[in-house]
Amino acid sequence: MFGRDGFVVSDSAREEGSAFPTAISTTQPFDPGAGLDCHVLILNRNYMAIRVTNAKRAFSLLYRDLAEVVHVEDGQYLSYDFEGWREVSALKQRFEPDQHDWVRTIRFSLAVPRIIRLTLYDRLPAKGVRLNRRNIFARDENHCQYCGQRFATSELSLDHVVPRSQNGKTTWENIVCCCLKCNVKKGGRTPEQAGLTLITKPIKPRRSPVLSIQLSKTRYRSWKQFLDHAYWHVELK
């Protein structure tokens, strides 16, 4: 079943009240492209950053009129609903296609927005950075904190600097990335007991380490305007 001018919407998606993101027919002879996996910053209605999502979810919110695109151009904030962004995308595809990520449908293409604003949601963002495996790997940039080498995530583990067997706590200041070789060498000992040295002192980051990685990329530089010092404590997922 077809939705708005070329969007293929499955019956199940229509019944659930969703459309674009989960409803592109797998039987259609086209590839929506990798743009659906790009990151999009979500603001609440008061323009406060609350989290990061993927383009797939962002387009779902836009299509259902639950959000609008916030586009930063020449220092100005411009807002577009779904249809307005479709028109802007047509111009961008014609004049600056290499400056954007794209999602392609049967009849047209859409530029992936970098920022969207929820039009009804006004809750404040949660505070604090979650202590989890992904954020620790991002904080330590996949470097073993004992030998200093960089490894794939699958080749790293998490190590309690002061082992739990010695009353070590599960905190930002006591957990680091560790390669398998160094982990075996350290065992259930402190670095000093094992003859190892930490290359950096583990600390709790002021902002999401994953977000920091995204901000280092040119494509997400427009996010910085919405992430001043008052929002660095926001937990972004």
Image (spheres, helix red, strand yellow):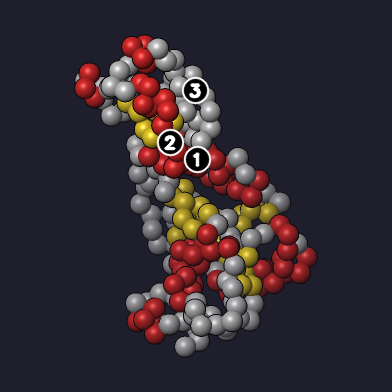
29 relative to 41, above or below:
below
Which is nearer the eye, 139 or 69?
139
Q: Dots 2 and 1: beta carbons under 8 Å?
A: yes
**In 3D space, how far apart are the residues under numbered discs 3 and 1 (Cα atoms)?**
14 Å
Q: Amino acid at mark 1?
A: Ala
Q: Residue furthest bottom?
A: 1
Where residue 32 sits, quadrant-wise, is bottom right
Q: Secondary structure at mark 1?
A: loop
Residue pictured at 49% horizontal, 65% vertical: 56
Mark 2 burial class by Cα count in 10 Å: few <14, some 14-19, many 20+? many
**In 3D space, how far apart are the residues under numbered discs 2 and 1 (Cα atoms)?**
7 Å
Residue where numbered disc 1 is placed: 152
Q: Secondary structure at mark 3?
A: loop
Q: Dots 2 and 3: beta carbons under 8 Å?
A: no
Q: Earlier in the sequence, mark 2 or mark 3?
A: 3
Give the percent coordinates (x, y) of residue 37: 52, 59
Where residue 225 sits, quadrant-wise, is top right
For residue 67, say whether it is visible: no
Residue where numbered disc 2 is placed: 156
119 relative to 140, above or below:
below
Where residue 80 sits, quadrant-wise, is bottom right
177 relative to 50, above or below:
above
For residue 94, side relative to residue 150 (left or right): right
Q: Earlier in the sequence, mark 3 or mark 1?
A: 3
Residue where numbered disc 3 is placed: 147
Mark 3 burial class by Cα count in 10 Å: few <14, some 14-19, many 20+? some
**In 3D space, how far apart are the residues under numbered discs 2 and 3 (Cα atoms)?**
12 Å
